[in-house]
Image: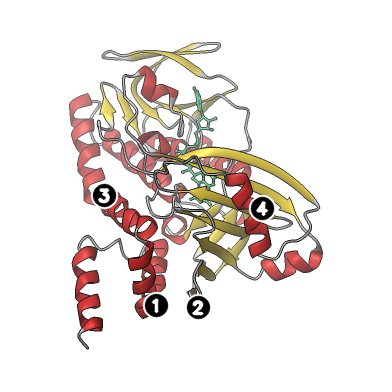
């Protein structure tokens, strides 16, 4: 059997791509190396820009919802709260969330091969995919196999994404701490040099983590910063703790997103938000547009490639391009950033929340508007 589409990986990008591909009438399989549901290292904070476009109800996998978030800076009096009428961040656990999308995809006829890793790929008019147990053939391959993306390597991509390390702990704390910290989703910018710490309350535990989201000459001692961060949020005692570490690609690849039959999406492409390192919503979005690009191509490889780039250039790539520049200013130019925050902090925090909500994108002319605002402040 020759599939129209083989999706490698069943994270949010792959599961979403498979869902949409099958819904659009393409014969689709997912090849996943783990057995589902599988744990995935992630804070599990799903922002509203992703949630509002989910094509089915996800409430049964929602752990908590936050209509308010706290953004705290490591400088005196720089703490902001933003509120919205819809959940700014929805807390999920990635095992049940990702599995839900796969199950929804299966309802549309997607085949699931699990417990088999892709190990070899032969490209051509039809691609041949060798897994640890079987061989499959597909006209299109969607590489949704995450930050390490073996598929991208096998298909000839070089490594051009910026990879950032993050540590995440699933912890249980005494009831009074859990109650206090469960009141909001919290980001502590600068809890790590060139990065932030987060405290995301789940149903019965906290997901607490730290990440370094810029190139750092010194390798950051994330474990040490995590321990300091526990102090910052007032956690003195941890009852149980599971530690997980991984990398997040926070810049898009510079050598393209399509080669022969292979289309990259999600972390494999480097589509996480460069400022926040939030990757779930763009993973889901890129999965959807890759599936649409293929479905609209009438099985023509060249046309599918053109379609995919057109869709990427509509919104995602311009937003990531601006995000990369903004992240540099945000993390590397702390003095200017804090000066801006002192003057316009609440306004900027609200702007950031609008991005989380999917109500606006990063302003591509942000440098101009910063200098305009600063001039107005200085010469007032
Ligand atoms: C510590 C940490 C915290 C994070 N917190 C957040 C957060 O709070 N909010 C947020 O939005 N983002 C967060 N992210 C980023 C987010 O986890 C990723 O951006 C997101 O998972 C990308 O989804 P994906 O589908 O592209 O890849 P993944 O979710 O990584 O899925 C890839 C899948 O491919 C499978 N696979 C890999 N190799 C093969 C192979 N050879 N054959 C078959 N299958 C294979 C894997 O088993 C996996 O299931 C965090 C990341 C880290 C590391």
Q: How far across and how far down the image is residue 125, in percent?
A: 26, 14
Crowdedness near tag 3: few (<14), some (14–19) or many (≥20) residues, C-alpha within 10 Å: some
The Cα atoms of the two marked residues, 3 and 2, are separated by 31 Å
Quick check: marks 1 and 3 in contact, CB under 8 Å?
A: no
Is 329 left, or right, of 368 in this rendering? right
The Cα atoms of the two marked residues, 4 and 2, are separated by 23 Å
Quick check: marks 4 and 2 in contact, CB under 8 Å?
A: no
Quick check: marks 2 and 1 in contact, CB under 8 Å?
A: yes
First in sequence: mark 4 vs mark 2: 2
Crowdedness near tag 1: few (<14), some (14–19) or many (≥20) residues, C-alpha within 10 Å: some
Q: Secondary structure at mark 1?
A: helix
First in sequence: mark 4 vs mark 1: 4
First in sequence: mark 2 vs mark 1: 2
Say whether mark 4 is within 8 Å of ligand 1.
no
Q: How far across and how far down the image is residue 171, in percent?
A: 72, 51
Q: How far across and how far down the image is residue 145, in percent?
A: 46, 30
The residue that label 1 is drawn on is 342
The residue that label 2 is drawn on is 77
Q: Secondary structure at mark 4?
A: helix
Is 12 left, or right, of 3 in this rendering? right
The Cα atoms of the two marked residues, 4 and 1, are separated by 28 Å
The residue that label 3 is drawn on is 321
The residue that label 4 is drawn on is 227
């Amino acid at each position: 059997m020759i599939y129209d589409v083989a999706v490698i990986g069943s994270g949010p990008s792959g599961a979403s791509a498979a869902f949409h591909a099958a819904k659009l009438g393409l014969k689709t399989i997912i090849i996943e190396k783990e057995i589902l549901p599988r744990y995935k290292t992630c804070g599990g904070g799903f922002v509203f820009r992703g949630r509002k476009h989910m094509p089915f109800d996800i409430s049964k996998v929602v752990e908590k919802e936050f209509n308010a978030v706290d953004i705290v800076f490591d400088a005196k009096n720089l703490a902001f709260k933003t509120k919205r009428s819809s959940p700014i961040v929805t807390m999920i656990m990635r095992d049940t969330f990702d599995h839900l999308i796969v199950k929804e995809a299966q309802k549309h006829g997607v085949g699931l091969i699990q417990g088999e890793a892709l190990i070899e790929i032969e490209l051509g008019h039809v691609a041949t995919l060798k897994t640890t147990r079987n061989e499959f053939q597909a006209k299109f391959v969607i590489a949704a196999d995450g930050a390490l993306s073996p598929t991208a390597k096998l298909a000839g991509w070089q490594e051009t994404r910026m990879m950032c390390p993050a540590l995440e702990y699933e912890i249980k704390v005494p009831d009074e701490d859990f109650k206090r910290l469960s009141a909001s989703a919290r980001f502590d910018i600068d809890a790590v040099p060139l990065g932030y710490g987060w405290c995301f309350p789940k149903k019965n535990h906290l997901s607490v983590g730290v990440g370094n989201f810029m190139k750092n000459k010194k390798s950051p001692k994330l474990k040490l910063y995590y321990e300091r961060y526990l102090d910052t949020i007032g956690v003195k005692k941890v009852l149980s703790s599971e530690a997980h570490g991984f990398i997040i690609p926070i810049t898009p690849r510079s050598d393209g997103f399509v080669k022969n039959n292979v289309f990259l999406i999600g972390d494999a492409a480097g589509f996480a938000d460069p400022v926040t390192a939030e990757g779930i919503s763009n993973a889901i979005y890129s999965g959807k547009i890759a599936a649409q690009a293929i479905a609209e191509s009438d099985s023509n490889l060249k046309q599918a490639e053109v379609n995919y780039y057109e869709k990427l250039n509509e919104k995602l790539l311009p937003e990531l391009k601006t995000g990369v520049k903004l992240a540099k200013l945000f993390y590397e130019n702390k003095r200017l950033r804090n000066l801006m925050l002192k003057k316009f902090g609440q306004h900027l925090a609200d702007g950031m929340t609008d991005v989380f909500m999917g109500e606006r994108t990063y302003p591509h002319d942000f440098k101009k508007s910063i200098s305009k605002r600063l001039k107005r402040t200085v010469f007032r």
